Image: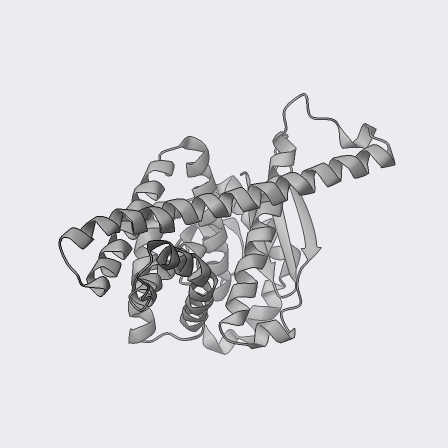
Amino acid sequence: MEGVMMRNGNKYAVAVRKPDKEIAVDVKNTRDINDLWHKIPIIRGIVTFIDSLVIGLGTLMYSASFFEDEDTPDKSTLSEEELKKLEKKEKAEMGGTLVLSLALAMGIFFALPYFISLGLNRITDSQALIAFAEGIIRITIFLGYVIFISRMEDIRRTFMYHGAEHKCINCVEAGLPLNVENVRKSTRFHKRCGTSFIFIVFIISVFVFMFIRFDNTWMKLGARLLLIPVIAGISYEFIRLAGRYDNAFVNAISKPGLWLQRLTVMEPEDDMIEVGIASVEAVFDWKEFQEKNKECF
């Protein structure tokens, strides 16, 4: 929607451009990144993935709350009891939306390519080749989906805010003062992007699924769905690696995700950049960061 979410350590902020053109900023605490689960490779990726889904949906609902229909009750006029009931209903709706979204994603991007690839059993007995073809089908469906939604006006604006997010981060990491002019000049591509993460999930799934050996069709599908969190955990380690190092290997594995960002990360308008800056400054002291790392710029 009309906003940008930034996360730093145990805090995250979402800044939204309201209909009256003012910027609203909401800051909340999240899971402690220094807990046990965030110290175990693969597991920390699974925890972060689930955490990001919940936070992402919550921030979307917060952003959407500024653009509610006229028949939506004004919370300021509700009693404490009515407010609790409304919040309980909203949480239930958020949970239902999350479950439905995950079910649709697994059905479209994992189950569907699997069933399509079964037709190749008539051509070859090589399960590894069929699994590879399944991966190609999965990536093709995903690319088609991204191209399709990128043509929608609302989604294009969302992708422009995505660009504002990246450009703000790149501006800070380049050692430049965080202002509209410097952010505008910064690149919109970033190796730690969620788009890159999803693409790496699909690539890694190709190789992981090659090793699933079951004769039963439904057991194969079940194993694929159960392995999705593990694949997400492995993909997180790749993204983490890309964020820490800059060498030929890291740049090579980052390339596909950066190419895909040409579809999901668009150049923002100046008022979108202002929203991105507000989100950054709500959770991150960029001046202190640049002072500590000035020898790297």
Name above or below for residue 234 compared with residue 117: below
Please provide percent x and percent y for residue 149: 38, 37
Residue at position x 20%, y 62% from top? 129
Q: Quadrant of residue 147?
A: top left
Q: Pick the residue in front: 143 or 274.
A: 143
> In the picture shown, does residue 166 fall above or below 39?
above
Residue 131 higher or lower than 15, as above or below: below
- Residue 73 appears at what percent x and percent y? 73, 26
What count of labels does the image hold?
A: 0
Q: Nearer the viewer, residue 259 or 94?
A: 94
Q: Which corner quadrant of the image does residue 36 belong to?
A: bottom right
Left or right: 264 with respect to 283? left
Residue 87 placement (x, y as % from top left)? 74, 39
Towards the viewer: 142 or 174? 142
Taking the spot 71% from the left edge, 37% from the top edge, the residue there is 89
Regarding residue 34, the answer to whether it shows in the image is: yes
> Most extreme residue toward the front, as rendered?
216
- Residue 182 appears in the figure: no
| Left or right: 240 in relation to 96 | left
Left or right of 172 on screen, residue 87: right
